[in-house]
Image: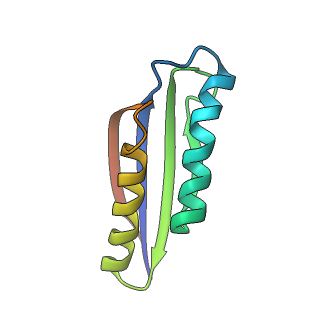
Amino acid sequence: MFVLAYEVELHLGASHSLKDKRQVIKPILEGARRRFGAAAAETGFQEQWQRSRLGFAVVGSSARQATDVMDAVDRFVWSHPELDVVSSERRWLE
């Protein structure tokens, strides 16, 4: 079993309230769950309206499978023009 975690920190420049922020974040989290079968959650900056940290995790039968799924999640996050990716990090979990 191979577990890969991905954490991404975002800046949402057009967001002017927590409601605006959640309207952007919610489709990303739900899309990652639905389209890729990844676990997804907002893991940081919940009360700041222009910043967010999202966490994703996938479990695969091989390292290649987990990496392929996480690559797709990564492209999905980057495909949203309304946000700027500040940093991202991947970790293998044991």
* Depth order, front residue of 5/75: 75
Can you tell which quarter of the image residue 48 is in? top right
Query: How far across and down, in percent of the image, does residue 69 sit?
Result: 40, 69
Q: How many marks?
A: 0
Residue depicted at 34% across the width and 43% down the height: 88
Location of the N terminus by quadrant is bottom left
Residue depicted at 59% across the width and 14% down the height: 16
Query: How far across and down, in percent of the image, does residue 57 sit?
Result: 49, 62
Residue depicted at 54% across the width and 64% down the height: 35
Location of the C terminus by quadrant is bottom left
Query: How far across and down, in percent of the image, does residue 18 sit?
Result: 66, 22
Residue depicted at 55% across the width and 19% down the height: 15
**Residue at the top extreme, as displayed:** 16
* Depth order, front residue of 23/5: 23
Can you tell which quarter of the image residue 37 is in? bottom right
Colouring style: rainbow
**Residue at the right extreme, as displayed:** 19
Q: Is residue 5 above or below residue 83?
A: below
Query: How far across and down, in percent of the image, does residue 14 sit?
Result: 49, 18
Q: Is residue 45 above or below residue 88?
A: above
Can you tell which quarter of the image residue 63 is in? bottom left
Left or right for 54, reference 7: right
